[in-house]
Image: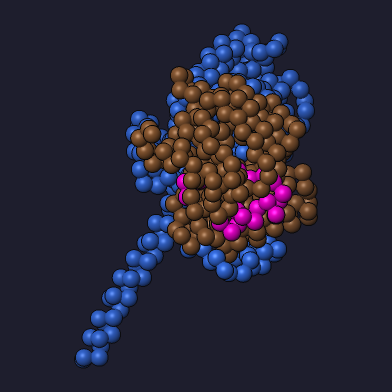
Chain colours: A blue, B brown
Amino acid sequence: MIDTAGPKAPAASSRPPLLDRRSLTRVTVIAVLLLLAIFALPPLMSGYYTDTMTQVAIYSIVTLGLGLLVGRVGLYSLGQLAVLMIGAWVGARLLFATSQPYILVLIEAGLVTAIIGSLITLPALRLRGLYFALITLMLAGAVIVVAATLNFPNGGGGFSGYNGALLHIPQIRRPSYAGTDPAFYRFSVIVAIVMFLLVFAHLRTRPGRTWAAIKQSEPAALAAGINTTVYKLWALALAAFVTGVAGALLAGADRELFSIDFPIQNSISLLAVVLMGGAFSLVGAVIAGFLQAFLPAVLQIWGVSNDWLIILFGLGVMQVLATAPGGVADQFPKDMRRLYRLISRLWRRTAKPAEQGGDGA
Amino acid sequence: MIEVKDLTVRYGGVASLDGMSLTFDRGVCGLIGPNGAGKTTFFNVLSGFVRPASGTVNAFGDNLLRMAHYRRARWGVRRTFQTEQAISDLTVYDNVAMIHSRLRGAARREDVLNSIAFVGGGISPWAKVGSLTAGQRRLVEVARAVTGKPRLILLDEPAAGLPDAETAHLTSVIRAIPEQTGALTILVDHDMALVSAVCATAAVLDFGKLIASGPTAAVLRDEHVMRAYLGTAEV
């Protein structure tokens, strides 16, 4: 009900503080977890888990990019694996061909991937929903075919940097300060943090607000004078940039790249984990990174077949679509609150009869 | 002033607008007609979502149809939608500030806050639109329409589905729009009480054809109009 005679919007000129108490707690918790991940975790982990956690950091960046497209702009891309491949290829090629600092290579790989990635998705931009998903899957298929023919650079010469006759294959180099596995893990986490901050900055400013408008109502955005094509392209380019950086990071993490490391079904599982983790939040991207890179590694150690994972993901996506559209990142806190309420109600119920019983005795 | 000449829009074999010629002068003008008469199509032509088969629209000396749709907001076209399109994830302020505006910095901020205060309804600029009532969301859309120096405001059934008290509030807001903004406002609505309360002139569409126009009271008494609305048999 509208307060028709009421005063004009009270305290209209003072914007609420950027950090209220709840978000301050949240920022603190996240900061502590990140510090633990960087400093406390590496000495505790075996080589296997160090590698796995490096992959988690890298794939969190990939799911960050895909989550941006799916959750913020409403573009269901199945082509992010191909974008990752492009980033990895460019990163590996630059690392073999030049002696530039690793960070510079990361940025260059990101930029090249952003250009190529948005150019190939440009024709699909007029489509939405299922059609966009299908077209991007086809494009991913095409890129994978090209990559399989071209091969990943292995220290050879020429444009492709591949020489099938090499007997001794040099490893892809790492930065001098992150040569060991634990050091490279730390480096990956820090790069991931920077990428998350980059996306966060976008979401909190004009592009983020514009994407929200485009996602809910393209007509309203157009009527407001927003050039929706430019902003969609911007989102695609940003997602491709961070994914390209992740690809170049992957080159250093794996030290040797093969096209069979990028099976096309991963293109689909990436979308599945993003939906399950939660496409609408940045925490969801981290959860998705764990689902994509950590879960398979753990299952392998437990000797569980990878096929179970596909079944699990299928069930997970169905569950998300049916009951929890916000994914784990949204549902888990809700469930915890519900559990807390349930327990406190049970506690009160059991406490009361006990008191009464005490009186009667 | 907006001069529409011979405007025709076809969807396949159906002429949604059939050679419509009309001049909107100033103030709030009503555009009424039964469902499917072509009112929303006319708005879609003006905001650039639909390309007409023929015809011209001269708006304050500019050829509106030659502009790309997203440029028309910069020129000064604003519109609301039949199904309200306020963005739930954003605050009221961000919803209104979404409009492309030439104003920058403090002037823009003041303009946006003024527009929100203008529509009233006790809406805080910092509230999430998702937390507002249906009536308040309508008002947010109206605030979006009056911000950033508009020249032509198109209101597509702003009172649809609102209870009487909220419609009364909306009526006073719409009536104040020309004074607040100086913009020419075209109102489409089925609520004849609203139309006669705010519109000095009105035009009536039926099956894509203009069947009457002029002072609102006279138009509403026109026998062709009554027939179009009530379906009276041919006399």
Residue B178 sits inside the magenta stretch:
yes
Residue at 37 percent of width and 38 percent of height: B231
Judging depth in this view, the residue of A200 and A356 nearest the camera is: A200
Report the magenta residues as a range. Answer: B171-191
Is A254 left or right of B228, judged from the image as shown? Answer: right
Residue at 36 percent of width and 46 percent of height: A323
Residue at 26 percent of width and 82 percent of height: A354
Judging depth in this view, the residue of B118 and B177 nearest the camera is: B177
Residue A107 sits inside the magenta stretch:
no
Q: Which quadrant of the figure contains the C terminus of chain B?
A: top left
Question: How far across and how far down the image is residue A267, in percent?
Answer: 48, 27
Question: How far across and how far down the image is residue B136, in percent?
Answer: 53, 57
Is residue A6 something one can see in this rendering?
yes
In this rendering, the answer to whether A274 lies above or below A32 is above
Judging depth in this view, the residue of A299 and B141 nearest the camera is: B141
Judging depth in this view, the residue of A340 and A34 nearest the camera is: A340
Q: Which quadrant of the figure contains the N terminus of chain B?
A: top right
Question: How far across and how far down the image is residue A24, in percent?
Answer: 61, 62
In this rendering, the answer to whether A189 lies above or below A75 is below
Residue lying furthest front: B235
- Res A66 → quadrant: top right
Is residue A261 something one can see in this rendering?
no
Is B109 left or right of B35, judged from the image as shown? Answer: right
